[in-house]
Image: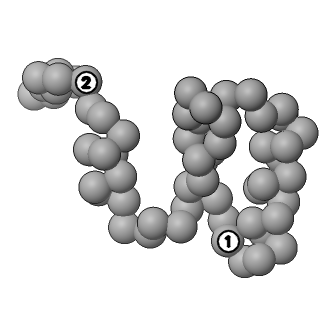
Amino acid sequence: MAGARLPQHTPTLEDILHHENNDRNYKFSSRFMTIYEAEEIFKQGVERGICFEALLITEQ
């Protein structure tokens, strides 16, 4: 990609969330959550009219 520049530092979650327009399109989850629990979060979101784009996995 011509003219593309690498970031000077690794972006933090705070950096990324700062650019999000919709603060309801993600949810935090524990790294110990099973894939079935994660799937259930997405299903419940759809039932509530919320389309989650991502689960952000945390250390806890």
The answer, for residue 2, to whether it is visible in the render is: no
**For mark 2, what is the residue?**
10
Q: Give the quadrant of residue 20.
A: bottom left
Nearer to the camera, 14 or 25: 14
Nearer to the camera, 22 or 5: 22
**For mark 1, what is the residue?**
50
Task: Describe residue 6's horizontal placement relative to residue 31 as left or right.
Answer: left
Nearer to the camera, 19 or 37: 37
Q: CA distance from mark 2 to mark 1?
A: 29 Å
Counting every numbered tag in the picture gives 2
Vertical position of residue 54 compared to residue 1: above or below: below
Nearer to the camera, 7 or 5: 7
- Amino acid on which disc 1 is placed: Ile
Mark closer to the chain start, 2 or 1: 2
Task: Describe residue 20's horizontal placement relative to residue 48 as left or right.
Answer: left
Vertical position of residue 6 compared to residue 45: above or below: above
- Give me the residue at 56% from left, 27% from top: 59
- Amino acid on which disc 2 is placed: Thr
Q: Position of residue 57 (x, y in %)?
A: 59, 35
Residue occupying the far bottom of the picture = 49
- Give me the residue at 72% from left, 77% from top: 49
Q: Position of residue 40 (x, y in %)?
A: 86, 52
- Give me the residue at 59% from left, 47% from top: 28
Task: Describe residue 14's horizontal placement relative to residue 35 as left or right.
Answer: left
